[in-house]
Amino acid sequence: MRYLIVFFSAFLLVACKKEQQTAETSTPADSVKNTQDTVAAADIPSGKIAVDTFPFPTEIKECSCYFAKTKADFLAEKYIYADDAGKTAYMKLDGKRMALNLISSSDMEADEELSKEIENDNYKISVKGKKIKGEEALLFEGTLTIEKPDGTIVTIPIYGECGC
């Protein structure tokens, strides 16, 4: 009798495991991915910084610098950074549109390189770029680095222009 109970228990255990594996493989991969993408977009886990696109800020009236992640995004006006050439930078970070004070900005015409530092209580942002073309407006390629107080760092390639 004891052997019968052990055999029956082992049989049930194996049957349950096979059923679990079948259930996991029968779920379409696309639906799993869509669920994960939706959750990631709705709730940003700590250790990540969401950098979202936004339209050109209406607050900027004259000279400015504005950047997108790629040339295609730039041409589609999907900006991730804009500033009014000296005072205020605009970004959309972790779902919130922000106006940040520029701490420093380099003289672009001296060395054909761009450097900007922006900082507030929650973010330290550094923009570095090299001039790739100059006409009325100066085109730049470079990187935008964002750091949070908890040590999280994100570096994004940028493409954009500065001009009046």
Image: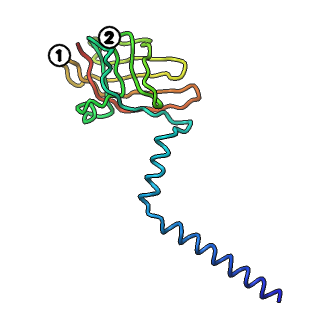
Alpha carbons under labels 2 and 1: distance apart: 16 Å
Q: Is residue 129 above or below residue 61?
A: below
In terms of secondary structure, where does tag 2 sit? Answer: loop
In this picture the colour scheme is: rainbow
Tag 2: amino acid: Asp
- Residue 100 falls in which quadrant of the image? top left
11 w.r.t. 115: above or below: below
- Label 2: how many Cα within 10 Å (few below 14, some 14–19, many 20+): few
Residue 107 is tagged as 2
| Labels 2 and 1 touching (C-beta < 8 A) | no
116 is higher (above) or lower (below) than 73: above
Instruction: Single out the mark in the foreground, 2 or 1.
Output: 1
Residue 31, image x, y percentages: 44, 57
Locate residue 141: give its quadrant.
Answer: top left
Determine the residue positioned at 36% across, 24% down.
Answer: 81
Q: Is residue 1 left or right of residue 34?
A: right
Q: Residue at x 47, y 52 (%)?
A: 35
- Would you identify the image quadrant in which residue 145 lies? top left
Q: Measured along the vertical axis of the image, is residue 16 above or below residue 8?
A: above
Name the residue carrying label 1: 136
Give the mark nearest the N terminus, 2 or 1. Answer: 2
